[in-house]
Amino acid sequence: MVIPDRDSHIRRYRVATRWLVRGGVAAGLLLLGLIGAGIHYASVLDRLAENRLLRDENTQLKAQLHLVQEKLAHIDETLDRVERFDQKLRAITALNDPERGLAIGPLEGTAQPKDEEPAGGIGGPAEGLDDRLDSLVEEAARNERSLAELHRYFEDQRSLLASTPSIWPTRGWVTSDFGVRVDPYTAERVMHRGMDIANRPGTPVVAPADGTVVFAGTESGYGKVLVLDHGYGIKTRYGHLSEIAVRLGERVQRGQRIAGVGNTGRSTGPHLHYEVRVNGLPENPRKFLLE
């Protein structure tokens, strides 16, 4: 029943009950559809936001992957330079020379040829980075072991240089060199196993290299004698001393005062008798002088 206003006629309409039921059902279905569409739309919006986040993360990961690849390429180039430098050092020092008995052969593990990089190396897919990283780790460890060996070698060489008599033990005039000479007492030709350096009594005698005092006493013919052991089979002897300034077993350094020039023993005047012996055999001291 519809009543437009007070002056109009009342209009009556008849609707069957079944249409009301159908209308209600249709309205309910429409409402459910709208609710479902709203939920679906919200879900789509959430997925869109998630997709944007994933896309941004994927972009960042690609950038990071590219950066990692560049760093791996830089590490690879650095290891190549280290390996070449290692080879140069070995060539210079003859560390692999079999005649010197220093060769150790190739270090465990062999370097992978550069033209046979594993699949997925630099510039390959991300899943190949693990293999490349493992390869670089092995190569770095191999270079580390090789450089450690070179370090030990150079440390040994530094010790050898420090133990090699290379400076004059005293200043003065060389009155007799190493070699055959006429003995001033017997006038016979004999082997002079050292070098005689004349100077005033008490002139300082210094250690020509690092070493240890292994003898400090008196010997027939040489008077007061001092012997230093420098290691590596090298020993130096000092005769006709006026005094000995170090003790038996004392460790001395190159340039340290160890004695004074004297005229003790079988001597014709104040001087130092200086010998260098390698593995017990006398050598010409001039061979070791760098000054």
Image (tube, rainbow, N blue to C red):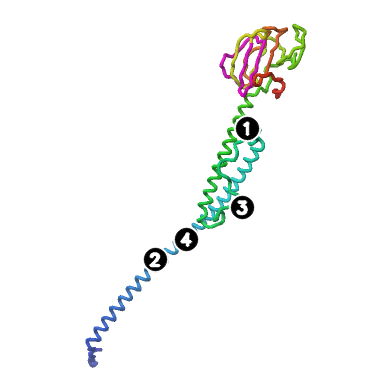
- Answer yes or no: do the residues labelled 1 and 2 have beta carbons within 8 Å? no
Q: Quadrant of the C terminus?
A: top right
Asked whether 234 or 56 is in front, the reply is 234
Number of callouts: 4
Q: Residue at 62% of width from left, 8% of height from top?
A: 218
Of the two numbered discs 1 and 4 on the same chain, state the one appearing first in sequence. 4
Q: Which residue is mark 3?
A: 115
Q: Quadrant of the N terminus?
A: bottom left
Residue 101: image tag: 1
Is disc 1 surrounded by few (<14), some (14 to 19) or many (20+) residues within 10 Å?
Answer: few
SS at mark 3 in the image = helix
Q: Which amino acid type is shown beneath numbered disc 4?
A: Asp
Question: In terms of image quadrants, where is residue 151?
Answer: top right
Q: CA distance from mark 4 to mark 3?
A: 36 Å
Range covered by the magenta-colored residues? 225-253
Q: Which amino acid type is shown beneath numbered disc 2?
A: Asp
Q: State whether residue 259 is above or below residue 59.
A: above
Q: Which residue is mark 2?
A: 46
Residue mark closest to the camera, 2 vs 3 = 3
- Answer yes or no: do the residues labelled 2 and 4 have beta carbons within 8 Å? no
SS at mark 4 in the image = helix
SS at mark 2 in the image = helix
